[in-house]
């Protein structure tokens, strides 16, 4: 649980910092498409930083293996999806364009694994 809280908080911090960087340092210095890609990366980064907080909570109440797998899938998605969009936004290079959908699939896998872990929760009367 502690690992997921730390990773969620650190990635939440990073997504805010990177979003602010885009708004204050990239705007006007890169093209609109590059800025939009960077901002999309930051937005999805934040969504999945918050998802890691859900993983932290669920790790106490549900299948450890499913919640761990969901957490690592979210981390992989942040690196691959958001990271490739940050790269595109900063460089204009489409060299990592094929990595972006792999990151998106990792996000989807994370949500599916989180749902499976939640489905296994035992309810209390």
Image (tube, helix red, strand yellow):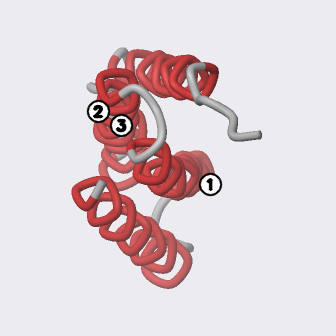
Q: Is residue 88 visible?
A: no
Mark 2: which secondary structure? Answer: helix
Q: Is residue 52 above or below residue 7?
A: above
Q: Residue at x 46, y 32 (%)?
A: 62
**Residue 100, which numbered label?**
none
- Residue density around tag 1, few if under 14, some if 14–19, many if 20 or more, within 10 Å: few
Mark 3: which secondary structure? Answer: helix
Q: Which residue is mark 3?
A: 71
Question: Would residue 12 be found to the left or right of residue 1 on screen?
Answer: right
**Which corner quadrant of the image does residue 3 belong to?**
bottom left
Which percent across, then down, holds residue 16? 48, 74
Q: Which residue is mark 1?
A: 32
Q: Residue at x 40, y 47 (%)?
A: 60
User: Which of disc 2 and disc 1 is earlier in sequence?
Assistant: 1
Question: Would residue 118 be found to the left or right of residue 55 on screen?
Answer: right
Q: Is residue 77 above or below residue 102?
A: below
* Contact (Cβ within 8 Å) of mark 3 with mark 2: yes
């Amino acid at each position: 649980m502690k690992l997921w809280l730390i990773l969620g908080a650190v990635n939440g911090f990073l997504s805010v910092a990177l979003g602010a960087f885009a708004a204050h340092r990239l705007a006007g210095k890169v093209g609109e498409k590059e800025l939009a890609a960077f901002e999309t990366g930051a937005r999805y980064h934040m969504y999945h930083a918050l998802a890691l907080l859900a993983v932290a909570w669920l790790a106490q109440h549900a299948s450890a293996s499913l919640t761990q797998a969901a957490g690592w899938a979210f981390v992989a998605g942040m690196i691959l999806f958001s990271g490739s969009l940050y790269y595109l936004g900063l460089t204009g290079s489409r060299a990592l364009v094929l990595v972006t959908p792999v990151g998106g699939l990792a996000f989807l896998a994370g949500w599916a694994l989180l749902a499976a872990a939640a489905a296994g929760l035992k309810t209390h009367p």
